[in-house]
Amino acid sequence: AFAINQVIHTDSSGITETYTGTHVIHASVEDGLGEYVFQLDDGAFQEGDVFIDVLPGLHVVTIKDINGCGSVEIELSVIDFPQFITPNQDGYHDTWNIIGIATGDPTAKIYIFDRFGKLLKQISPLGEGWDGNYNGNPLPSSDYWFKVEYTENDIQKEFKGHFTLKR
């Protein structure tokens, strides 16, 4: 059996970091006796089973037995999100949205909550994103939480996190 694990190492260097951190994919073979090589997207095959600094988006990991006994391709999403939104109409960070699953699952849903758990908005990763308003009124600078529900390889998944709205 083949397994793919996604690991996210967060960077604690501060708000200047646009996204959450470094994305790592670890591809492993369970119960396999052979020797394997690993490929991310259309890159070169490698002996190591770890891919570092993977960009957000839809990816294909190929695991191949070096003796020609078989291979498998596994499609997966690397999800990321901006750590902040500054909706001041300057063209930079005016809206907030998840990146990495828009083409992978068009039925994905994103829910945005305030610090008390009140649902403020439901958006699609295919849309323009959230503008920091609730019922047409601008919300104050604060941290906001989100939940993403999506399907990957016919498995229902959920991803949660938070970001800052700065006015």
Image (cartoon, rainbow, N blue to C red):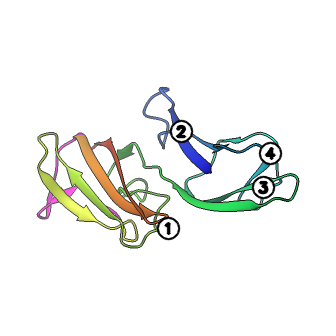
Chief SS of the magenta region: loop
**Circle nearer the N terminus (4, 2):** 2
Cα separation, mark 2 vs mark 1, equals 19 Å
Residue 34 in percent (x, y) is at 80, 45
* Amino acid identity at mark 2: Val
What crowding class fits label 4: few (fewer than 14 Cα within 10 Å), some (14-19), or many (20 or more)?
few
Residue 164 - label: none
Residue 122 located left or right of residue 116 = right
The residue carrying mark 4 is 34
Q: Secondary structure at mark 4?
A: loop
Residue 138 lies in the magenta-colored region: yes
Residue 7 - label: 2
Residue 67 in percent (x, y) is at 88, 53
CB within 8 Å, label 4 to label 3: no
Cα separation, mark 4 vs mark 3, equals 10 Å
Q: Secondary structure at mark 2?
A: strand
Dot in front, 4 or 2: 4
Residue 93 lies in the magenta-colored region: no
- The residue furthest top is 12
**Circle nearer the N terminus (2, 3):** 2
Residue 104 - label: 1
CB within 8 Å, label 3 to label 1: no
* Amino acid identity at mark 4: Gly
